[in-house]
Amino acid sequence: MNQASRPGRGGRPAQISVEQITAAAVDLLDREGLEALTMRRIGAHLGVAAMSLYRHLPGRDAILSAVVNHLFATALADLDAGPTWTGALTRFAVAYRRMLLAHPNAVPLLATHPVDPETAVPVLAVLLEGFAAAGVDQDEALIRIQSVGVFTLGHALAQVGARPGAADVEGAVDAVADAGGSRDAGQDPEALDYYQRWFDAGLRALVIGFDHRGAPV
Amino acid sequence: MNQASRPGRGGRPAQISVEQITAAAVDLLDREGLEALTMRRIGAHLGVAAMSLYRHLPGRDAILSAVVNHLFATALADLDAGPTWTGALTRFAVAYRRMLLAHPNAVPLLATHPVDPETAVPVLAVLLEGFAAAGVDQDEALIRIQSVGVFTLGHALAQVGARPGAADVEGAVDAVADAGGSRDAGQDPEALDYYQRWFDAGLRALVIGFDHRGAPV
DNA sequence: CGCGTTTGAGTACGGCGTAAGCTTACGCCG
DNA sequence: CGGCGTAAGCTTACGCCGTACTCAAACGCG
């Protein structure tokens, strides 16, 4: 069998596991970026040939999905429902965002590879508790949770995709020259502050908006 | 010179232009998907060798960025400020979303390639008018516009990334069997309706939330 | 008519994902 | 203890990718 072979009987013992492949991929991703996530380099990072990875996963895309699910699950593992759904939703967004900023190279992966249901459902279940306790029906609760999720991810995409120098669009609207400016690796503190204020404002607006349901626009 | 050669004097006349390359790329993207956007296939689609594209653009990534900017600009070309910023913001989101759903294969590109300032600024300028008229300062206005933008894009990523069969996560939460179900190309009407309701609710929440600024969360 | 200039074509290189077949290293059973 | 079944890892090879480099073609102009 290709994978999912129960450890039943004999055979050569495995020297790598799916978890190790995932961890190596995350490490390589954080350290060297998306373009380092090739079968050969992941294999080399594990002391194994590229083709050996196929004994554990069906292909490269499966590794990327494994990375996505791993990061999502570990970032949101110890989420709790708490007394209010607004609080839980906010903590969800903050924890999600913290992970995204800790792994900026992974953000495009999160954007293009959906978290699979068996990873997402436990996280959602915790959040749904709080909504159910507040009498919000499940469809509406899912909409609120997912709205915060896509906002957080979309926001991180903008932050991570922006050039290191400045806050992109808003810098360009303020326009004109100040042609100098520092161009370090990473983002300058001003830009970091801008993105944080933007994130806070957007998240607050979503939560407030969902709380004021029925008010006319 | 590699590009930006003013048409000054003689030389062999060009048989392709940056605009034609962009159009060919969009066409290929819509028709055959992201993986069809290779230099060779774009060239072939224009009756030209792959390397000839480099006379007009510095590389593949520039083509992808050109596609992003083209789609963004044309989708939002005839946006107007209107009487209220809430209306303008909503029309912005709806027009942006319409483009994203018309070009689903382009959504990952929009997510990973920032719209460059000279494309974004004219669109933003129109929207900023409405905010200025309502007395909202520019920083706050940009935050509101960009929040709606990243929500819309993030939402489209979720919709486009979802498996054709069902509404992904919310289908999985409703859980259990109903193991049959249609698996066509495209999405079934139920899923389309779910995403549309989700989008409407999220957008309304954002707009309402920004309108109720200062209310305690 | 050549000459400068610009565009397009041809060739080549290194790297990619991965299909196919082979070798290696185990547990087990006779 | 020897061979066998089995699963893991390795080697090779293929087609495709982006693109650097070099040359041929096609124009305006003197």
Image (cartoon, coloured by chain):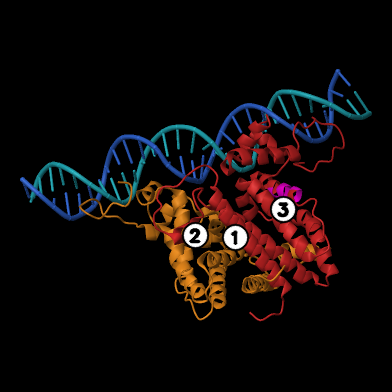
Chain colours: A orange, B red, C blue, D cyan
**Where residue A56 sits: x, y (%)?**
36, 52
Residue at x 76%, y 42% (from the top left corner): B3
Would residue D4 be found to the left or right of residue A141 on screen? Answer: left
Q: Nearer the viewer, mark 3 or mark 1?
A: 1
Residue at x 87%, y 34% (from the top left corner): B9
**In which chain is the residue bearing label 2?**
B
**Where residue B103 sits: x, y (%)?**
64, 46
**In which chain is the residue bearing label 3?**
B
- For numbered disc 2, what is the local secondary structure? helix
Where is C6 relative to A8, above or below? above
Q: Which residue is mark 2?
A: B170
Q: What is the crowding at mark 2: few (fewer than 14 residues within 10 Å), some, or many (at least 20)?
A: some
Q: Quadrant of the C terminus of chain B?
A: bottom right
**Where residue D14 sits: x, y (%)?**
45, 32
Between the residue at mark 1 and the residue at mark 2, the CA separation in whole angstroms equals: 11 Å
Dominant secondary structure of the residues highlighted in magenta in the image: helix
Q: Quadrant of the N terminus of chain B?
A: top right
**Residue B95's mark?**
3
Q: Nearer the viewer, mark 2 or mark 3?
A: 2
> B56 or A183, which is in the foreground?
B56
Q: Which residue is mark 1?
A: B198
- Residue A187 figure quarter: bottom right
- For numbered disc 3, what is the local secondary structure? helix
Amino acid carrying label 1: it is Trp
Range covered by the magenta-colored residues = B68-74
